[in-house]
Image (cartoon, rainbow, N blue to C red):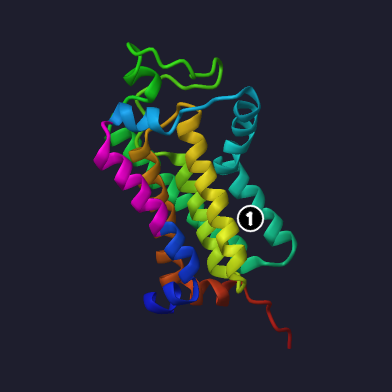
Amino acid sequence: MMFSEIFRKNRYFTAGFLVFLIALVWVMATYSKADGFYLLNPWHPKALDDFFIYYTNLGNGFFSVVVSLGLFAFRKRFLALMVMVDYAISGILAQVLKHLISEARPAIYLKDSSYPYFIDHVTLHNFQSFPSGHTASAFALATALALATKNRMYGLLFLLGAIMVGYSRIYLGQHFPDDVLVGSLLGFVTSVLCWKYWETPFRKFTAPRVKG
């Protein structure tokens, strides 16, 4: 499938993703690293803390594996394989970048500030902030599912779910906007490239074998 056809069939998802990227770029261009983080963290009620502590796990690699196994169980073998490969590639790339580029997480970067919303036993304190692996996994999964569905509204729901995972990483004090932006790009681009180059061989590989 040509890139133009991929984007045309998923133009709502792609357009929404571009709006998301533009919003993050605007924050990064308009505000300093610290001020952009503060801008996106104005309000932290306990109920929202609890929600995002659990919701952010949708970007955990284990969730992508569970989704892949679920798809396989329902005989969606092609999509199960695509989800697993997208997750593996985007996850590996994210981990390589984390080890090549040492960037402090917000709790370390802002240790001398009066920021009050870091959460005990949740917020990480290390130098593996860039990029966001949870966001990469969430967008790899959302993009794969959006490319597979013919219902554009479902595609938008998948996008919204991934955006919320990305925001949860900022909300929970784990990442800065640039970490989330690059993580989302990793997930999106990985899925699109896999679909472009491996859709046909994956479909052949997972097609039911005809006896006779």
Q: Nearer the viewer, residue 145 or 27?
A: 27
**Kind of residue at badge 1:** Ser
The image quadrant of residue 15 is bottom left
Q: Against 128, is 82 above or below?
A: below
Element carrying mark 1: helix
Horizontal side, residue 28 vs residue 11: left or right? left
In the image, which residues are magenta? Answer: 18-32
x, y percent for residue 91:
45, 45
Where residue 164 appears, as percent x and y from the top left, is: 54, 44
Q: Is residue 22 magenta?
A: yes
Quadrant of the frame with the N terminus = bottom left
129 vs 10: above or below: above
Question: Which residue in the protein does label 1 denote?
Answer: 68
Where 63 sits versus 209, above or below? above
Residue occupying the point 40% across, 45% down: 183
Q: Residues within 10 Å of mark 1 (few under 14, many from 20)?
A: many
Q: Residue at x 56, y 77 (%)?
A: 204
Front-most of residues 10 and 90: 10
